Image (cartoon, rainbow, N blue to C red):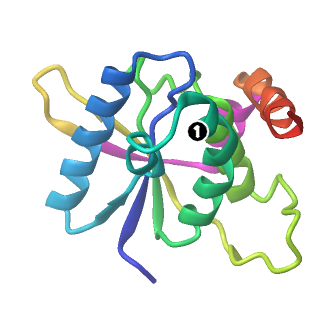
Amino acid sequence: MPRGVYILVPNEGRNVNDVVHHSRVAGRVAVSQGLTPINPLLFYMPYMTEEELAKHLPGESSRWVKRVSKIWICPLEGTRARDVSDLDAVSHRILRENEGLLAPRRKRYAMTSRLPVYHFSQEADGTPRVQVLDRLEIANMLQCNIVSGLLSGVAHAV
């Protein structure tokens, strides 16, 4: 299995500079741990407008997440706590797919097993912290972010 990690930073309605900063910090830590950081948002951001990102990022993210061995959730608010109740529609969709709660539209679906999901944060002194999230924590997170999940369906219909 690849030694890649999908860096999931919720970005809807957030300051672009904050999103880029958190993505880079998480990517730097991933590299220091011998992992290959995958972050479609950082990859596509320079080439697409906000409207194009909103349209293409969900599909691209689903394709990229199939090529990694784990997922890191890197929330902007509450980075020093385990509060990850600020998911956006793309993050919500990826977690639902990973948990098997979202039936894929394609006949051939490559993700046959659940990837481990981790919460990436930084301590007050800047020390990175990566903690595994169990399925109950992820289920609670998805329930807390039900509006994001509902909005992801609206985004694809437009």
Q: Which residue is mark 1?
A: 53
Residue at point 82%, 40% (across, down)? 156
Residue 130 spot, x, y in % from top left: 32, 45
Residue at point 67%, 73% (across, down)? 113
Most extreme residue toward the left is: 125
Most foreground residue, 98 or 24: 24
**Horizontal side of residue 158 vs 79, given as left or right:** right
Residue at point 55%, 29% (across, down)? 50
Kindly report the secondary structure that dominates the magenta region of the rendered protein. Answer: helix
Placement of 141 over or under 1, stated as above or below: above
Most foreground residue, 157 or 96: 157
Placement of 53 over or under 101, stated as above or below: above
Chain part drawn in magenta: 130-143
Q: Secondary structure at mark 1?
A: helix
Amino acid bearing label 1? Leu
Number of numbered discs: 1
Q: Is residue 115 magenta?
A: no
Quadrant containing the C terminus in the rendered view: top right
Residue 36 spot, x, y in % from top left: 30, 66
Residue 56 spot, x, y in % from top left: 65, 47
Quadrant containing the N terminus in the rendered view: bottom left
